[in-house]
Image: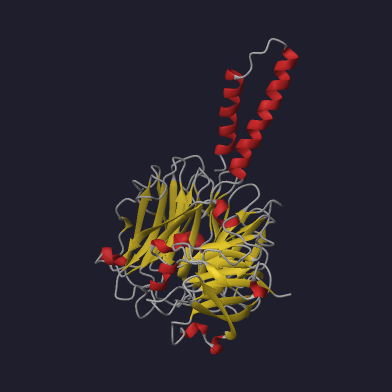
């Protein structure tokens, strides 16, 4: 991970000096030192630059475990100096768990890198008082185990609490609502909330939070404002305001990142026909914010997102990469040019909602998010997950010549047998979990990128089994078993698929008809279930448009 690289080099250098340098001539010793040291540095740096991808998925909240709660929503996550992970959530009462329903402010903690989690701990009791715990933000102070929480009650009053022991215990709440009165002459608000996700700490130690204020009780016509503290949260002060982009009535739930240029970028939610994120800039991260504008590189279904600096070069961004109102395709992206473009992306989940990002002291990345997969009739998220990964999982996993960002939604172990392959040929194993081989394939597809699937994934049922995108406009071919009839709905002419009249045949003499559809570069290509539980799984081949 990022801070282990230097440590490893130092330790290896110590071994060199202790064990390898007993030459008598000073010149020879220096030459030998330089030579061996260079070898070790290359080996260590190389092993880190090309580290194995790491990924782990953990469910942290499920409403079925708690009769008191119907919905868990508004994820927030931070990591402390001792590498404790603290997550916070709105634990809402039923039956629907809407914004104004009575709710508690709850947290969990992990001290083993997210593998196991503490019991749910209520830090703000709203349900017993018939009050809504109205959103929250966590802010972790660098180099300490201090965590701050900003939260609202009934979208009317704002409070601050903090923990100095990584979330074990919390201070008594202190109301800070009065500082928001200064914004009324610029935005005549009637409700307020801290937003979602994490807050921010500037290099000088200043704590920053970006709540939103709204002119309507139904949260319409809202925008982000900034509050800050220079004394570790003891007192809070009003900062600037961001006015929404032209064509959007809102700019809210903003998160902040400092760019390499020194400027600060606020990335917020918007309501507009563009279905894009909104961004604004400031020189100091507090005030003087530019008017918001749309970021056309970041599709968004009008939902919460998160942005966080990973290291000196890379910035992380998570949201639902959707150009409609559907909260699907939870994706994490990486930029190395101050968010002008995103050079890598990895789809993490199908039906998600809000998400937040944290990075621990070892460089592991955590995406904490809602899960809408088992939503009730009102599609409310009732589970939450942590996706843990390293940077290599996002930037360097299973890349073909054109295929990128393979995501398999099969929650059984079968997903481990899927892989991106290059140069498909006769004799290749068709599946990752079977020994069947391909004996016949159309000549024009030989040598193309393809996805080796798992035959046991034929048991999976649902709208989206696998997704990926391509670096070029491409034709996607599905080799689908002739033993399955009728074909699944997604593989129909109404959805753009055409039967080519060609076949793939394996060494068991099983025939798979080839269907084709054209996809644009960068589009997430979502493919559904096999459609025949007892029949062989499909195979995917990708051919760039010439």
- The percent coordinates of residue 530 (x first, y second) are 45, 77
Q: Is residue 405 visible?
A: yes
Task: Give the left or right position of residue 161, taking residue 318 as reference.
Answer: left
**Quadrant occupied by the N terminus:** top right
Q: Residue shown at 55%/70% (left/top)?
A: 439
Looking at this view, name the residue that lies furthest to the top: 24
Relative to 219, does residue 72 appear above or below in the rendering?
A: above
Looking at this view, name the residue that lies furthest to the bottom: 494
The image quadrant of residue 14 is top right
- The percent coordinates of residue 447 (x first, y second) are 66, 66
Q: Is residue 273 visible?
A: no
Q: Residue shown at 49%/45% (left/top)?
A: 232
Relative to 165, does residue 499 appear above or below in the rendering?
A: below
Relative to 440, does residue 140 appear above or below in the rendering?
A: above
Relative to 133, does residue 510 appear above or below in the rendering?
A: below
- The percent coordinates of residue 392 (x first, y second) are 57, 52
**Quadrant occupied by the C terminus:** bottom right
The tally of labels here is 0
- The percent coordinates of residue 27 (x first, y second) are 75, 15
User: Which is more toward the observer, 427 or 105?
Assistant: 427
User: Which is more toward the observer, 537 or 42?
Assistant: 537
Name the colour scheme.
Answer: secondary structure
């Amino acid at each position: 991970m990022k801070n282990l690289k230097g440590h490893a080099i130092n330790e290896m250098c110590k071994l060199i000096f202790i064990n390898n340098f007993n030459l008598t001539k000073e010149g020879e010793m220096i030459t030998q030192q330089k030579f061996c040291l260079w070898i070790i540095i290359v080996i260590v740096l190389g092993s880190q630059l090309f580290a194995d991808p790491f990924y782990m998925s953990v469910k942290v909240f499920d409403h079925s475990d708690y009769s008191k709660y119907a919905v868990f929503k508004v994820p927030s996550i931070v990591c402390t100096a001792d590498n404790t992970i603290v997550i916070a959530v709105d634990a809402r009462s039923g039956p629907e768990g809407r914004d104004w329903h009575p709710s508690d402010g709850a947290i969990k903690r992990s001290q083993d890198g997210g593998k196991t989690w503490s019991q749910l701990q209520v830090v703000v009791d709203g349900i017993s008082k018939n009050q809504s715990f109205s959103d929250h933000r966590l802010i972790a102070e660098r180099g300490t185990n201090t965590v701050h929480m900003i939260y609202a009650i009934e979208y009317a009053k704002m409070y601050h609490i903090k923990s100095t022991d990584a979330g074990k215990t919390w201070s008594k709440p202190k109301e800070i609502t009065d500082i928001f009165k200064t914004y009324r002459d610029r935005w005549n608000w009637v409700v307020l909330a801290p937003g979602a996700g994490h807050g921010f700490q500037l290099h000088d130690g200043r704590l920053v939070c970006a709540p939103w204020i709204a002119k309507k009780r139904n949260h319409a016509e809202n925008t982000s404002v900034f509050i800050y503290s220079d004394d570790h949260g003891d007192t809070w002060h009003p900062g600037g305001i961001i006015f929404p982009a032209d064509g959007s009535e809102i700019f809210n739930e903003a998160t902040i990142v400092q760019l390499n240029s020194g400027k600060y970028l606020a990335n917020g939610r918007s309501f507009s026909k563009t279905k894009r994120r909104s961004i604004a800039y400031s020189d100091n991260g507090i005030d003087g914010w530019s008017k918001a504008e749309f970021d056309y590189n970041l599709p968004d279904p009008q939902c919460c997102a998160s942005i966080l600096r990973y290291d000196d070069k890379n910035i992380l961004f998570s949201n639902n990469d959707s150009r409609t109102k559907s909260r699907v395709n939870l994706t994490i992206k990486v930029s190395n040019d101050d968010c002008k473009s995103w050079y890598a992306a990895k789809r993490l989940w199908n039906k998600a909602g809000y998400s937040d990002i944290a990075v621990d002291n070892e460089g592991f990345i955590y995406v904490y998010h809602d899960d809408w997969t088992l939503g009730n009739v009102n599609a409310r998220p009732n589970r939450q997950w942590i996706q843990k990964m390293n940077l290599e999982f996002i930037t360097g996993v299973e890349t073909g010549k054109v295929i990128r960002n393979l995501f398999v939604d099969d929650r059984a172990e079968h997903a481990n047998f899927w892989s991106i392959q290059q140069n498909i040929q006769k004799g290749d194993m068709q599946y990752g979990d079977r020994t069947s081989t391909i004996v016949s394939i159309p000549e024009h597809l030989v040598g193309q990128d393809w996805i080796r699937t798992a035959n046991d994934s034929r048991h999976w049922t649902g709208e989206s089994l696998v997704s990926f995108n391509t670096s070029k406009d491409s034709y996607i071919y599905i080799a689908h078993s002739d033993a399955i009839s009728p074909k699944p709905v997604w593989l129909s002419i109404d959805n753009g698929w055409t039967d080519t009249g060609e076949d793939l045949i394996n060494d068991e003499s099983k025939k798979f008809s080839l269907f084709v559809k054209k996809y644009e570069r960068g589009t997430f290509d979502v493919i559904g279930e096999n459609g025949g539980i007892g029949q062989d799984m499909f195979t995917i081949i990708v051919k760039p448009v010439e």
